[in-house]
Amino acid sequence: MAEQLPLLFEHKFNLTFANFYPGKNREIIGHLKDCVSGTGEQQIYLWGNLGLGKSHLLQACCQLAQELKKTTFYYSFVADALPSTEILSGLEEYEVVCFDNIDAIAETSDWELAFFNFYNRHRDRGFKLILSSNCPPNWLTIRLPDLKTRLNWGLTLKLQELSDQESIEALAFKAKQMGFEINPTVGRFLLSHYARDLASLWRLLDRLDHATLAAKRKLTLPFLKQFLSQDESD
Amino acid sequence: MKYIINREQLLVPLQQIVSVIEKRQTMPILSNVLMVFRENTLVMTGTDLEVQIVTEIAIENTTFAEITLPARKFLDICRLLPTGADIKLEVADDKVKVLSGRSRFILSTLPAENYPEFSETELDHRFTINAGLFKKALEKTVFCMASQDVRYYLNGLLLNISNSRIKLVASDGHRLSVFEDNLANPAGYEARIILPRKGVMELVRLLDDPQIQLAIEFSSNNIRVTINNTIFSAKLVDAKYPDFNRVFHQDFLTPIHIQRQLLKDALTRVAILSNEKYKGVTFDLSSDSLKISAHNPEHEEAEEEIVTDYVGEPLSIAFNVQYVLDAISNIDSEISELTIASNSSCCIIDEPETRSYRFIVMPMRL
């Protein structure tokens, strides 16, 4: 069958608190905002499953810090592809520092030590540190005992899973920012027939955007069923 | 109160105003044209609350009055009266008498104080541009806008001002057009707004004098264009235009050059036998030759061959013929230039030299 290919539009969103679907995590957002603006905790350790929005929240912290004219730094660690520990030099002078996937530095002795030293210098200055990970601090496989203790010092917050209803709302919220609509029927169908985890659902959203653009169709239930069945056969 | 206006003075402004007025209205008064008589001027307004046109015409010394008249009926009457006729309006209570020669009409009015105000925020950005250039920019882009897409940004036109550069972009998701040029007077800021489809269409119609200088003012919610005695206002599309530049950042084959008319004629003929729904045609490129072919579900076939300057490996790519034709028809030069991405993921159609506008057509999988 003939198929028109669509243009590849990229939605470059600033990841802010305003475009984060809060669900049950409203309180966490409050803590993060307080921390960045200077009234809250000095250190926040945020953990939770893939797709819940840890990176989004950390970047939102940086956006807020910039609005408040604070110096800020964000870095996302990737296990097996750690940068040189040099990136930490001078970082203690930054008022708000966010490290995504801090679990990735565990069991790498030079990184554990370098991070421990940075941690102390940064903390002495009274600046804010926000970390994210897929597990609570006690479960980290960090070998340096002093570092592990320190990661427990601040406020540890667990991002809550969204209920089915909230996941549907979150999908519709994100789709709206991309310019199209996901009605509740379509949302429910996706959750019951496609995937329940947000990480897979976010990935699907881009592909649905392209598919509806190519077909110049609304995302209706019949369209979605056709898309998913073609997807399986491909 | 009596007013005399010449038909020729009234006709064009009235036509422009009626064009923004929707045929079906939720508020009856929006079918009317607001007419405000002041000393030596008549100000007429028409709106659908999204787009508004206000135009001022000079008339001989008058007393103050505000009325609203059924716009389409009033236009039809003026239009069908003889050229050069004087039209006399007599205002009395809730009726207006329209008299001209031996013709007599009585139109009903609605109170002018109920005419809705067009809400506008403070217009904090401003630039000036030659009307001819702006009209050309609009004409080279509007045909790519979507009309009823769920994505609001596609049913509009991106206007991007970067100090001394102006850029207009429109796309329906299958093709895209970009117009870029310099502003004679640098604007001193960077801004991106999306004009709504209807407003753009009306604006193109208003720009009939290529010589004049336009003052364009806008905020994040509204735009206002002043064209001589006419003020065009529109609410902007509340959305963010996505980034489309990735399409340019890839490897392209050496451009091929084809006589524009030759290509247009060949495409038009081949299109006859393309699938009515998908309109797909195949371009087969081989050294020095472009073969364009189509077939339909009735197994009928069309084929045209054009000599080109293509050098390279044989290549096959398919397009919706209408998209290619629209782009080719908007090329001003005799020669059209087609630049296909190395991985056949898109085709850029433009003029060989000037490059103030470019059209991108995405391919089809047949």
Image (tube, rainbow, N blue to C red):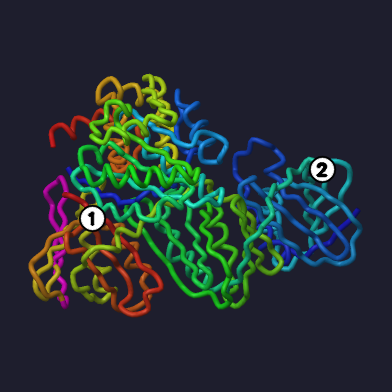
Observer-nearest of B209 and A169: A169
Give the residue type at disc 2: Glu
**B251, above or below B345, in the image:** below
- Visible residue check, residue B268: no
In the picture provided, is B321 more to the left or to the right than A21? left
Q: Position of residue B56 (x, y in %)?
A: 75, 63
Q: The N terminus of chain A appears in which quarter of the rendering?
A: top left
Alpha-carbon span between mark 1 and mark 2: 54 Å
| Segment colored magenta | B291-309
Q: Is residue A19 magenta?
A: no
Give the residue type at disc 1: Pro
Observer-nearest of B147 and B222: B222
Q: Is residue B306 magenta?
A: yes
Q: The C terminus of chain A appears in which quarter of the rendering?
A: top left
In the picture provided, is A19 more to the left or to the right than B112? left
Discs 1, 2 touching: Cβ within 8 Å? no
Q: How many marks?
A: 2
Residue found 78% across the figure and 53% down from its top: B35
Observer-nearest of B59 and B176: B176
Q: Position of residue B239 (x, y in %)?
A: 49, 47
**A148, above or below A63, in the image:** above
Observer-nearest of B349 and A164: A164
Residue bearing mark 2: B113
Dot 1: element: loop
Q: Chain of mark 1?
A: B
Q: Residues within 10 Å of mark 2 (few under 14, many from 20)?
A: few
Classified by dominant secondary structure, the portion drawn in magenta counts as strand
Residue bearing mark 1: B363
